[in-house]
């Protein structure tokens, strides 16, 4: 039993890793290989899954619309050719192998090009960009939705050739069934492996209002986003009516803490022994490796992130955001994510506007109830990774 996993992004790698870990538990003798199409594949390395081809970082971090020229100069076309060759070589060596594609059209196309049976986990697109349960949303540009779906005809053509495709939400699954495509809804795997670990203990802040800060996981963009988030915090402290406020900075393990701490010094956050930073009844803790605990402990979030923002919303928590410099969290990306998450994500135009919006949300029980229900509706309950792994195992045994 041999499987090759293709994924194109850090968030997609983590989703794929969750599925593969579940598959390994169900089928310990499966031979796994991976090819991260964006980045170095740290998730796969941590799982001990060998890579079959080149894996490297490019300037855009996978967001070609904001860094196409820089990626081309850095060797994009050579990397694409090498990845295509690696997939074809694996397919020749494994005539009965199975391919798992996680992400968007690039891994989907490569999976089809392999000539082997393939399964697609569609993480990038959702019909919520065009419509919600009540009907179509206002168009953001001319020609939007011309294909009748957020998936273009050529994407649907590829999906039709998959063994099975798992869309990211139930609305998208229902919509794609109009074309009689092999799609099924089992939940969103990004909501798996988020159980709290119980390792986050902050003395003196047991009753505080907790706000998680999510600057993203890609350097150097995450450091720029962190600077913007710090600009928002004085306004939050001023606007939010809570006896205590605790900010939890959930910093991705792959980031360097020195730029994070240097920015705190520039913004004159006093060091608070035993807590981290803070003053009076306001604390700020920088965490690394305690992401799950931060999400579960939080009452709300300030986020300029991709997958992490969606996971927080999926837990029923309100999120406030604003555009960053990119290449990922631009104004365009923020608007797309807001459509994806609906009322769970509120956008403001600048960091200084976050505080009043947070106060408005946190003091309205009806809004909080709506956000809690909406997050569960759009992201689903945990368990999708196990369900997808079971389907993969069935095809591996065929």
Image (cartoon, rainbow, N blue to C red):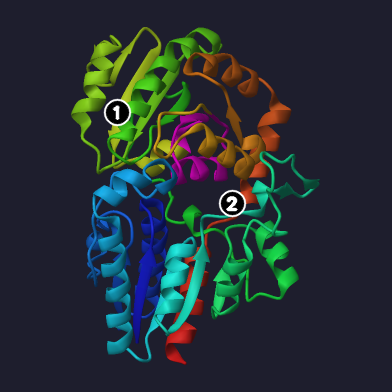
Q: Is residue 34 visible in this depiction of the protein?
A: yes
Query: Residue visible at 60% across and 73% down?
Result: 157
Q: Is residue 43 above or below residue 68?
A: below
The residue identified by callout 2 is 379
Q: Is residue 205 visible in this depiction of the protein?
A: no
> Does residue 101 appear left or right of residue 263 in this picture?
right
Residue 333 highlighted magenta (yes or no) = no
Q: Is residue 90 above or below residue 266?
A: below
Q: Position of residue 188 (x, y in %)?
A: 54, 58
Query: Residue visible at 33% across and 61% down?
Result: 37
> Does residue 217 appear left or right of residue 273 in this picture?
right
Magenta-highlighted residues: 296-320
Residue 269 numbered mark, or none = none
Q: Is residue 242 above or below residue 71?
A: above
Q: How many marks?
A: 2
Q: Position of residue 286 (x, y in %)?
A: 29, 28
Residue in front for this viewpoint, 109 or 28? 109
Asked if the residue under mark 2 is in contact with the one under mark 1, i.e. CB atoms within 8 Å, the reply is: no
Residues under labels 1 and 2: Cα distance? 27 Å
Residue in front for this viewpoint, 385 or 349? 349
Q: Position of residue 41 (x, y in %)?
A: 27, 58
The residue identified by callout 1 is 286
Q: Is residue 6 above or below residue 299?
A: below
Residue that extends furthest to the right in the rendered view of this protein? 134
Residue that extends furthest to the left in the rendered view of this protein? 258
Residue in front for this viewpoint, 22 or 215? 215
Quarter that holds the N terminus: bottom left
Residue 299 highlighted magenta (yes or no) = yes
């Amino acid at each position: 039993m041999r499987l090759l996993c293709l994924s194109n992004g850090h968030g997609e790698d983590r989703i794929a890793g969750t599925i593969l870990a579940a598959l390994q538990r169900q089928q310990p003798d499966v031979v796994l290989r991976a090819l991260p199409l964006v980045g170095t594949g740290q998730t796969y390395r941590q799982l001990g899954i060998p890579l079959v081809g080149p894996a490297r970082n490019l300037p855009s971090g996978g967001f070609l619309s904001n860094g196409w020229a820089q990626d081309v100069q850095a060797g994009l076309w050579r990397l694409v050719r090498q990845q295509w060759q690696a997939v074809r070589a694996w397919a020749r060596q494994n005539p009965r192998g199975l391919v798992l594609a996680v992400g968007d059209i690039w891994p989907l196309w490569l999976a089809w090009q392999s000539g082997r049976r393939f399964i697609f986990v569609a993480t990038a697109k959702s019909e919520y960009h065009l419509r919600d349960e009540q009907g179509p949303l206002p168009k953001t540009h001319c020609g939007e939705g011309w294909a009748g779906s957020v998936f273009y005809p050529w994407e649907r053509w590829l999906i039709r050739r998959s063994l099975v495709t798992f869309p990211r939400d139930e609305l998208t699954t229902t919509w794609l069934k109009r074309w009689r495509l092999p799609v099924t809804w089992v939940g969103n795997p990004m909501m798996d492996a988020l159980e709290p670990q119980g390792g986050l203990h902050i003395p003196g802040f047991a009753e505080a209002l907790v706000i998680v800060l999510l600057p993203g996981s890609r350097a150097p963009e995450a450091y720029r986003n962190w600077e913007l988030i710090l600009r928002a915090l004085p306004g939050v402290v001023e606007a939010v009516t809570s006896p205590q406020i605790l900010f939890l900075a959930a910093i991705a393990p792959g980031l360097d803490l020195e730029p994070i701490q240097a920015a705190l010094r520039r913004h004159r956050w006093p060091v608070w022994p035993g807590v981290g930073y803070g003053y009076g009844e306001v604390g700020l803790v920088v965490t690394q490796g305690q992401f799950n605990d931060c999400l579960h402990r939080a009452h709300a979030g300030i986020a300029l992130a991709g997958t992490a923002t969606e996971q927080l919303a999926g837990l029923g928590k309100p999120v406030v955001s604003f555009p960053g410099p990119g290449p990922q969290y631009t104004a365009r990306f923020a608007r797309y994510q807001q459509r994806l998450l609906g009322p769970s994500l509120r956008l403001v135009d600048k960091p200084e506007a976050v505080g009043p919006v947070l106060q408005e949300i946190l003091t309205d029980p009806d809004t909080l109830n709506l956000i809690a229900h909406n997050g569960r509706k759009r992201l689903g309950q945990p368990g999708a990774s196990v369900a997808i792994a079971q389907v993969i195992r069935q095809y591996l045994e065929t």
